[in-house]
Image: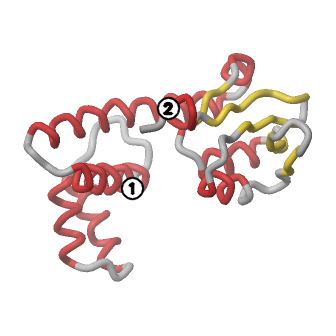
Amino acid sequence: MKDKADNTIILTKGSADTLYVQIPYNTVHIQRIRQVTGRRWETDTKRWIIPYSDASLQEFTKHFDALDVEISPELWVESDILRKWKLSGEQTQWKRDQLQQALKLRGYSRKTIKAYCNQIERFVASLPQINNGISASHVQTYCLSLLERGVSHSSVNQTISAI
């Protein structure tokens, strides 16, 4: 099993209008960074450069998991977008860890635990920012949207079990 540090994406400030993104080689991460408008690869330093703008940051945060990214202290202080994104990801991770432990104690397989956790993350990502918790109507609305997209009833039932 690879160490988490081996997979960490590092985001640092380059200049007033650029950010440096160091990504360990991973085809999924490469596909994601290529979706950020204005990105370019710097061969000499083996890092990506993206524009330091709200639009680029929002694109970047849409494509990457906050838990996979380490943000430099300077950016942490400067960027509300990055700080809020990183904090929201850490809150999700805490809940994910807790769920993984509970499912493991119940004897679920590693693949089932992964599937349940991923489904719950998709559900949580579909919600607006909620301060009062998740209600039954949130779950129903999400499940109905899955059915409308053609997801099978069996998959929706698994989603309900996971949530």
Task: Please rate how many residues cluster around mark 2, counting C-alpha atoms within 10 Å: few if below 14, some from 14 to 19, many from 20.
Answer: few
Q: Is 89 displayed left or right of 122 in the figure?
A: right
Per the image, label 1 sits on a secondary structure element best described as helix
Residue pictured at 20% horizontal, 54% vertical: 162
Seen as rendered, the residue at the extreme bottom is: 150
x%, y% of residue 137?
A: 23, 57
Name the mark nearer the viewer: 1 or 2: 2
Per the image, label 2 sits on a secondary structure element best described as helix
Q: Quadrant of the N terminus?
A: top left
x%, y% of residue 45?
A: 87, 36
Q: Which residue is mark 2?
A: 4
Residue pictured at 16% horizontal, 43% vertical: 103
In this view, 123 is above or below 132: below
Viewer-proximal residue among 150 and 102: 102
Snapshot quadrant of residue 96: top left
x%, y% of residue 50?
A: 82, 44
Viewer-proximal residue among 43 and 125: 43
Dot 1 amino acid type: Arg
Disc 1 from disc 2: Cα separation: 22 Å
The way the protein has been coloured in the rendering is secondary structure
**Residue contact at pointers 1 and 2, CB within 8 angstroms:** no
Viewer-proximal residue among 77 and 18: 18
Residue pictured at 57% horizontal, 33% vertical: 6
Task: Please rate how many residues cluster around mark 1, counting C-alpha atoms within 10 Å: few if below 14, some from 14 to 19, many from 20.
Answer: few
In this view, 113 is above or below 2: below
Q: Is 63 displayed left or right of 140 in the figure?
A: right
Dot 2 amino acid type: Lys
Precedes in sequence: disc 1 or disc 2:
2
Q: Which residue is mark 1?
A: 122
Q: Is 94 displayed left or right of 34 in the figure?
A: left
x%, y% of residue 98?
A: 24, 32
